[in-house]
Amino acid sequence: MSTIIEARPSGPLQGRVAPPGDKSISHRAILLAAMAQGQSRIENLLIAGVTRPMMDAVAALGAQRHLQGTTLEVESPGFQAWRSPDTALYCEHSATTMRLLAGALAASGVAAVLDGSPGLRRRPMRRVVAPLQRMGVPIRDTDGHAPLLLEARDRQTPLRGGVFTLPVASAQVKSAILLAGLAAAEPVEIHEPGPSRDHTERMFRSLGIAIEFRPGWVRMTPPRAALPPLRLRVPGDISSAAFLVVAALIVPGSHVVVEGVELNPTRTGLLDALQRMGARVHIRPRGQQAGEPWGDIEVHHTPDLRGIQVAGDLVVRMIDEFPIFAIAAAQAQGTTTVQDAEELRHKESDRIAQLVAQLRRLGIRAEERPDGFVIHGGSPWQGGEVDAAGDHRLAMALAVAGLVASSPVRVHGGHMFLESYPSFLEDLRRLGADVAPIA
Ligand code: S3P
């Protein structure tokens, strides 16, 4: 696969498209299927760079998997009977794989090493290791980072539950504590400073686990019995849909329906932000899948977007969408300010520094702030050479920027979209976008 993606001025974008299964739900579904006892079946799973290491890891722990298209069947003895893997579990670039696995391994009590790419080794891991240690898990990090080392633990001795207050809102850390909590003697209660995504909670509830939750708070009572197998269909990923939504908003004459997308309120912050900007975005709920609301999103080109301020809980509810949100902001009249978003510096890249640097290369007026960024929108931008900085969401956002630039945008390292949205180029092209690998 080429590493340079070229996006050319295009349009209008028209048609209907369904993005692949949600990344966060796919990760949890694979892991919980392997923690459950018996045969689970997951449909519309995301098959991509980020989910492969999770599938490989559960196989190394003793679950058998059979993948056909996007349907995964997992036959497992349950986490209580996992075996210690022969080699380190290699999580590639996926922090979700590493942090969720740390919690699940803690519950199982097997010895394991969790490692990853140089990029993943730079991501903060103390935030997950510290609460697990408090629960009695023999785990340690390497100066706050991967590799993580788990020693074997006597499975007859349960872990400690209790009340955990997280310094940053993080669904990965919350989920790791909940997964470890499956082997705890007492209930686990978690307080967070913001409403991070609640997919683990919803999936626990669908498995019959006693759990209560509301934005920023969850309390789970560990089950005594083995986890029952899962049967679910993963709804489409709203974080992938986001690129199509913003592309349709900014390319003149566009009218697009993004179908089958998950609409969990902890994930729809971008849609709220765009609507506040005056975007012609309509949400059509269609039902529930895997305990998650889902539906279609209809988008019309909106030439008169207005700049807004984004802060507080809204940041948490759109945490993965800032690269593509910035492209909408660059088209909007006036200034857009993002604050309370220091966490963006700890994603696949330093998303504040990299985003601002790449947008400036296109002539977009953007400024860095310690906890966010400012964009002065409304002026046309030029094409040119930009760099994805090893970040899948930056790669896709910059490609979308190329659809309305005055000349082609070439995204170096653009192949990173394969991490989370392998059909990104195809889907955009099906709508009429001129975007292709060139080298
Ligand atoms: C995720 C949680 C978020 C998000 C990531 C996926 C998850 O990370 O950015 O892409 O599946 O739980 P944090 O938990 O670090 O906020």
Image (tube, rainbow, N blue to C red):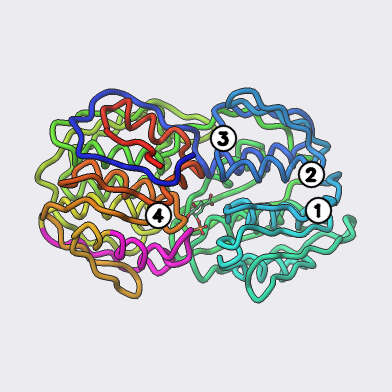
Q: Is mark 1 within 8 Å of ligand 1?
A: no
Left or right, 166 with reference to 88: left
Q: Nearer the viewer, residue 194 or 87?
A: 87
Which residue is at 31% across, 50% downward? 398
SS of the residue under disc 2 = helix
The segment highlighted magenta reads 334-358
Q: Mark 2 and 1 residues: CB-CB less than 8 Å, in contact?
A: yes
- Report whether the residue tagged 2 is closer than 8 Å to ligand 1: no
Q: Is residue 5 magenta?
A: no
Q: Position of residue 16 (x, y in %)?
A: 31, 24
The residue that disc 4 covers is: 388
- Label 2 and label 1: CA atoms lie apart by 9 Å
In contact (CB < 8 Å): disc 4 and disc 1: no
Q: Which of these two is toward me, 414 or 304?
A: 414
Write down the residue under mark 2. 60
Q: Is residue 280 above or below residue 333?
A: above
* Label 2, residues with CA under 10 Å away: few <14, some 14-19, many ≥20: some
Which image quadrant: the C terminus? top left
In the figure, residue 244 lies in which quadrant?
top left
**Any mark on residue 47, and which?**
3
